[in-house]
Amino acid sequence: MLDRLRYYVNGQAGSISHYVSQGLILSLFSRLPGLPGIAARTFAYRLIMKLDGYAAIEANARLRCTHNIRLGRNVFLDRGVYLHACPAGIEIGADTFIMHHAELHVFNFRDLPHAFIKIGRRCFVGEFTLIRGQGGVVIGDAVLIAPGVQILAVNHNYGLIGIPIMDQGITAKGITIKDGAWLGGGAVILDGVTIGEGAVIGANAVVTKDVPAHSVVVGSPARVIKRYDHGALSQALLREVGIPGCFGGKVSAPEY
């Protein structure tokens, strides 16, 4: 019984002391509505998590292992967002929006060495997006993630007859999504994948292997149907004016 209780507390907050302080602050402030609630949370949540500047956290955002959460300046967490940040944490860069009922989950009960989620600056994570970070998820700057996307940095082993798949262990290689990419609604990104800078993932695509920079992929499994050429505009120049370089190119003929 005590082992189960200890497991629950560690999974929710990391320790008894964090569990008590996290529970007290969240119970007092998490449901306060409107602008007064956002203002109160901006100050009160500094006691249990890391805030760089001011963040707008709407009512009823569910936060667990808050001492492992870091939010950049002007981050927005919508109602119903769920962040579960044990053990290596969740970091969200400045000016990033996490929309309602998105779930960023790092529940590492198997003691994996690289369990974390890191999201860059000026990203948009759409409604009902699911990100599982057991193998580590790195998302660059200015990445668009449409509603219902699944980014799953974990996979189950299988193939041993007579043993339930849930008992055969997992692999967790990690996922990287580079600057300026766009993930269409309902896309699924599987473990071990790197999505290149400025790549476009079509709606409902299932990505099982690396995606080249400045390309468009669709289908299940996803395949390249189009590539982009930078033309005369350099990435350095585009970034100087605040536009990721991936948006400055020319479109080449489709590839089938």
Image (cartoon, grey):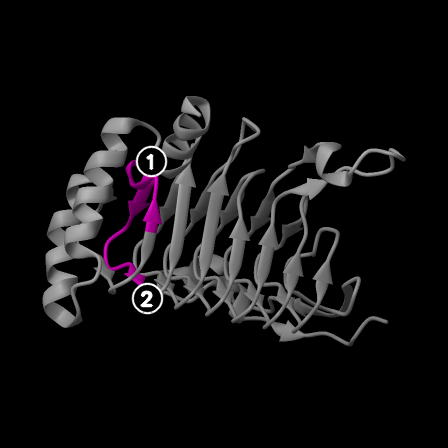
Q: Nearer the viewer, residue 165 or 144?
A: 165
Q: Toward the viewer: 201 or 49?
A: 49
State whether residue 112 is above or below residue 187. Answer: above
- Quadrant in the rendering for residue 231: bottom right
Which residue is at 77% across, 76% downward?
Answer: 253
Q: Which residue in the protein does label 1 denote? A: 13
- The amino acid type of the residue labelled 2 equals Asp
Q: Is residue 193 above or below residue 144?
A: above
- Earlier in the chain: of badge 1 and badge 2, it is 1
Where does the image place residue 59, in percent across and percent down from the top left?
A: 24, 64
Residue type, mark 1 in image = Ala
Furthest residue in direction front, as rendered: 1
Q: Nearer the viewer, residue 14 or 70?
A: 14
Q: Tell me the residue at 48%/62% (across/down).
A: 143
- Residue depth check, mark 1 versus mark 2: number of the one nearer the observer: 1
Dot 2 corresponds to which residue? 78
Separation of marks 1 and 2 at Cα, in angstroms: 21 Å
Seen from the viewer's position, the closer of residues 28 and 1 is 1
**Residues marked 1 and 2 touching at CB (< 8 Å):** no
Q: How many marks?
A: 2
The segment highlighted magenta reads 63-77
In reply to whether residue 159 is colored magenta, the answer given is no
Q: Is residue 220 left or right of residue 159?
A: left
Q: Is residue 255 left or right of residue 88?
A: right
